[in-house]
Amino acid sequence: MRPRDPGEDGRVASTLELFFDLVFVVAVSVASVQLHHQLTEDHVVDGLVSYAMVFFAIWWAWMNFTWFATSFAVDDWLYRVLTFVQMAGVLVLAAGIQPVFEDDDLRLVIVGYVIMRVAMVAQWLRAARADEATRRTCLTYAAGISLVQVLWIAVLALPDDVVPVAFVVLLLAELAVPVVAERRETTPWHPHHVTERYGLFTLILLGESLLGSANAVLEALHDDTALVPLLSVALLAFVTTAALWWIYFWPPHHRAITSLATSLRYGYVHYLVFAAAGALSAGIEVEIDVLTDHSELTDVAAASTVTVPVALFVLGIWWITLRANADGVVNTVVPLGALLVLLDPVLPVPFALTSVVLVLVVAVLVVRPPTTPARG
């Protein structure tokens, strides 16, 4: 397991990495469904807090494997088996998502998370054994991850009222491990490969929103009284999702990770982008519930479950990659468009302003292609 060449030609996601992503589809889908239930029942704060906690576990485990694989991936039996162990941990975590939302019970999520992270420790130890140049970095990762997992297990014994504070502390500890490990010698990430992996995960999350659009059509077939509004939601949700895809993939992402600082920014701020994309599908389902009289939310609150994720997604990707590859016009239009989307809840038609604004943003991106190299 020697380091991969960061300039390797033709490096693309492997079939194992794509298989790995499939289990995260399950976890993201369950988290989105549970958020949808909490929002539509008007448990907004509790739902968002639970979603943020669960999504951190999903995102962080996925991201750690992705950055490791871009630097050290091999295709032998041991690497595959350890990856399968991580995948099993994701399924355990997914099974524990509903108890988090309904009973604030983190036990099964923590168990699944620790399974994933212990397998990751084994991968780092194997890399440390194989390569002397990166051994210190790999051992630091292994030690840091191991320590934090011990603390996660200890959380299971804490009183319920202390758990939220402990969660935040350990979240910060998890985020600190790469910063400490990479401060002297960075792992050899492959810019094109790692950003492709992020793009693929974004597609998974946007796919959840397309499912929401399809569900609106299905509801319309069974509810003649809301036929036109539901079909409108389906169409506008599709337009919105397509526009988000266009905006996300407009800039050349590989330019955004040229140093440790920029790679950390790219990796960490993607939590906001990913979480917003996952929450968007829940918001679409909430809108369907409102139109079919199955929600306790007001029309304005329901519309906000869509517009806030869209605005966060656009602002997040603008900050990470788009602004460094755009001229003044684009760097004005994109964040302004994200802010205008937040005005949509005052309109009587869900998604209307959001879709129009995003289409206009895409039109600007079409006529003003990225030309400026990324700035550190």
Image: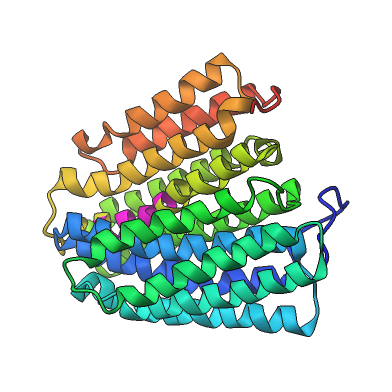
Residue 72 is situated, as x and y percent measured from the top left of the image, at: 76, 64
In the drawing, does residue 140 fall left or right of residue 162? right
Range of the magenta residues?
276-286
Q: Is residue 147 magenta?
A: no
Residue 118 is situated, as x and y percent measured from the top left of the image, at: 55, 77
Residue 141 is situated, as x and y percent measured from the top left of the image, at: 61, 62
Q: Is residue 131 above or below residue 361?
A: below
Residue placed most toward the observer, 217 or 341: 341
In the drawing, does residue 200 fall left or right of residue 55? right
Q: Write the residue at 55% across / 24% down.
A: 364
> Predominant secondary structure in magenta?
helix
The C terminus is located in which quarter? top right
Q: Is residue 282 magenta?
A: yes
Task: Please identify the quarter of the rendering in which residue 83 is found.
Answer: bottom right
Task: Please identify the quarter of the rendering in which residue 337 is found.
Answer: top left
Q: Write the residue at 17% across / 42% down.
A: 300
Residue 278 in view, yes or no: no
Task: Please identify the quarter of the rendering in which residue 343 is found.
Answer: top left
In the drawing, does residue 291 fall left or right of residue 194? left
Q: Write the residue at 60% across / 38% down.
A: 261
Q: Is residue 213 above or below residue 116?
A: above
Q: Write the residue at 29% across / 68% down.
A: 34
